[in-house]
Image (cartoon, rainbow, N blue to C red):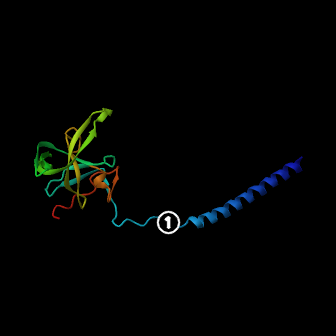
């Protein structure tokens, strides 16, 4: 009986070792065939900046730098704005709007810009109603980069931060470290 158990055990060991050698040989061949497919992509032309989830940004060429929330969940950026009026000139729709920040962050500023498009934003809470918002192009300085992109004008009065920087401004070279805030200063003030 002992001899049969020993023989069965020895046979299983030989089978396992044979399977391991065969698998290793197959993996070696497969690995050599796929080495070129697993080559890591080349480094991006410009390095990514790692920024906090809240940063100060410069609005346009103005000297004030309000805080902005960097949000990779938002497709388009938005700014807290009060719409004063819209008008049409030469078949182009324009908007006059006011942005107001704390006095220490620059106070109030009035802008006039062409409307690039209108967007429908779904209301919070899953309502089926939509809010229609105008979109304009604005320039922001984020870190040391001046970025001109679309921004929707919205009432952000009930939000902590007056500006939301969405993926349309983050996409080229900004990564968000959600454990940090205020890691960069907008250094485009004199550019």
| Residue 164 visible from this viewpoint | no
Q: Residue at x 13, y 50 (%)?
A: 91
Left or right: where does residue 89 sit relative to residue 19?
left
| Residue 59 visible from this viewpoint | yes
Where does residue 153 sit, x and y in percent of width and height? 19, 45
- Labels in figure, total: 1
Q: Quadrant of the C terminus?
A: bottom left
Where does residue 171 sit, x and y in percent of width and height? 32, 56
Q: Give whichever of 116, 170 is nearer the camera.
A: 116
Left or right: where does residue 170 sit relative to residue 111?
right
The quarter of the picture where residue 138 lies is bottom left
Few, some or many residues within 10 Å of mark 1 (<14, 14–19, 20+) = few
Q: Give whichever of 157, 105 is nearer the camera.
A: 157
Where does residue 117 sit, x and y in percent of width and height? 22, 48
Q: Which residue is mark 1?
A: 39
The residue most toward the front is 91
Q: Residue at x 16, y 56 (%)?
A: 60
Left or right: where does residue 85 sit relative to residue 44?
left
Where does residue 61 sit, x and y in percent of width and height? 14, 58
- Secondary structure type for disc 1: loop
């Amino acid at each position: 009986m002992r001899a049969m158990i020993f023989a069965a055990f020895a046979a299983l060991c030989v089978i396992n070792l044979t399977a391991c050698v065969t698998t290793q040989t197959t993996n070696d061949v497969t690995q050599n065939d796929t080495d070129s497919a697993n080559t890591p992509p080349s480094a991006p032309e410009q390095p990514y900046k790692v920024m906090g989830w809240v940063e100060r940004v410069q609005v346009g060429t103005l000297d004030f730098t309000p805080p902005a929330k960097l949000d990779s969940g938002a497709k388009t950026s938005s700014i807290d704005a009060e719409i004063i009026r819209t008008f049409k000139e030469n078949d182009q729709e324009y908007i006059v709007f006011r942005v107001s920040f704390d006095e220490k962050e620059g106070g109030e500023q009035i802008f006039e810009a062409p409307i690039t498009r209108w967007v429908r934003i779904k209301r919070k809470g899953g309502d089926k109603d939509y809010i229609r918002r105008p979109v304009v192009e604005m320039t922001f300085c984020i870190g040391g980069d001046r970025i001109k992109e679309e921004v929707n004008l919205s009432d952000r009065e009930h939000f902590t931060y007056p500006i939301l920087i969405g993926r349309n401004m983050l996409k080229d070279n900004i990564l968000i470290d959600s454990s940090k805030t205020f890691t960069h200063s907008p250094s485009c003030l004199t550019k």
